[in-house]
Image: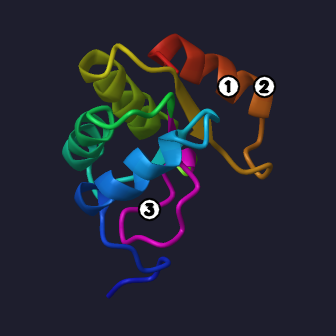
Amino acid sequence: MRWGPPNSGIKNYGLEIEDAKYANVPLIQSIFGKSVEECREVAQIAIKYPIDMLEFNATCQHSDFVAVENNPKLLRSIIKEIRENVQTRPIAVKISPNVGDPAGFAMTLEKAGS
């Protein structure tokens, strides 16, 4: 069952991203996946396009893969995996204000490579 807003997936966004680059503004691609491996794969596809930054959506409630912001160990492993495979772009992590210690959480993520 699909819960999120419908989209055609990262592989089909190529033309839209290429067109958006002509707007001469920074392009940030938000990504998510159903597993650590899928997150890595989506990130690797995303950097083939002329984007300036990746944003990993750790708050995604629209997936059977739980909101990973509630699992710091899993989130660290995802960010490390993305960072090891995507070394050429900055990575931001979207977290909700409901994280118990946002500053501490952010420092942990920074150490993981975001």
Q: Is residue 108 above or below residue 41?
A: above
Instruction: Check disc 3 and report the residue beneath it.
Output: 66
Label 2 crowding class (10 Å Cα cut-off): few <14, some 14-19, many 20+? few
Residue in front for this viewpoint, 56 or 54: 54
Whole-number angstrom distance, CA of label 2 to CA of label 1? 5 Å
Which percent across, then down, holds residue 32? 40, 52
Overall secondary structure of the magenta stretch? Answer: loop
The amino acid sitting under disc 1 is: Ala
Could you say which quadrant of the image residue 77 lies in? top left
Instruction: Check disc 2 and report the residue beneath it.
Output: 103
The amino acid sitting under disc 3 is: Val
Label 3 crowding class (10 Å Cα cut-off): few <14, some 14-19, many 20+? some
Q: Is residue 97 left or right of residue 61?
A: right
Q: Is residue 15 left or right of residue 29?
A: left
SS for tag 3?
A: loop
Q: Earlier in the sequence, mark 1 or mark 3?
A: 3
Q: Residue at x 72, y 51 (%)?
A: 96
The amino acid sitting under disc 2 is: Ala
* Disc 1 + disc 3, Cβ < 8 Å: no
